[in-house]
Amino acid sequence: MNLRPAIAATFLFAPAIALADPPDFDRPGAGFATSVLPAGTVALEQGLPTYERQRDDGFLDRTYTADSLIRIGTGGPLELQIGGSAWNRLEERGQGSRRHAVGHGDTSVAMKYAPAGAHADGAFSWAALGEVTFANGDEDFGNGAKQYSLGTTMQWKPSDATQNTLYANVDRLKGRNTWTLAPTFGRKIGENWMAYVEADAIHDADDGNELQAGGGIAYAIGDHAQVDAYALHRIGQHGPSVVAGLGVSVFFGRAQ
């Protein structure tokens, strides 16, 4: 199964769970914010870490991933993103054997396009993200080949307190496609809290159809930082049985 930006990273996880302006952070949740950072500014979004549990062919795997995303505002409707995971740990057990591995994952470079500008306002906004993931990770934590991804997030915001998003994405790896479709329903609680629920429908080129459901929360610390927590649970026979994580996002302002 190919490694996807954790949702699913997922988890897999937020289409614009935005609590402050600036900025709108991309995590947690499936997808990404429908806005880009102001020109010359930088943000770091860090998993602390992501946890994934999966049983396959008699083996039980537990994976911990410290996923990192660096976002750089390049001006206008564009934003550069660099992602990766410098630390991963795999614990594998089954058929009378046990092993563990530690290493780094693949590195990705992406460009986000948000036509509404640096800060999207109004009832509807959208953004697109094109990404290339390079096969430079360790064997247990990489795709083994270059992966190309193209996704979009569409957001409907009927009020200041509620927002609904739809995330669609395709990953192309080794000549095969994996499709993801994930609706998310979020609500702001007070001045600092945001809670959301989501469902992820995935057609994996290798593992077949997957369905996960769950949600998360985010807490804004002023206008420049956020902490979050999320969890997804598998519905059906395929895919990770649990994906969960903690994270922190920090907006650093203008790059020096």
Image: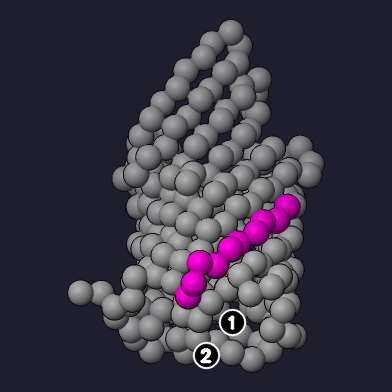
How far across and how far down the image is residue 23, in percent?
A: 47, 77
Image: 119 above or below 61: below
Q: Nearer the viewer, residue 230 or 72?
A: 230
Residue at 25% from the left image edge and 74% from the top image edge: 255
Q: Which residue is mark 2?
A: 116
Q: Nearer the viewer, residue 253 or 13?
A: 253
Q: Which residue is mark 1?
A: 126
Q: Residues within 10 Å of mark 2 (few under 14, many from 20)?
A: some
Element type at marker 1? strand
Amino acid at dot 1: Trp
**Residue that protrudes farthest toward the left in the picture:** 256
Is residue 223 visible in this depiction of the protein? yes
**Residue bounds of the magenta highlight:** 214-223
Residue at 43% from the left image edge and 45% from the top image edge: 66
Kindly report the distance in space between the C-alpha atoms of the residues bearing marks 1 and 2: 8 Å
How far across and how far down the image is residue 155, in percent?
A: 65, 79
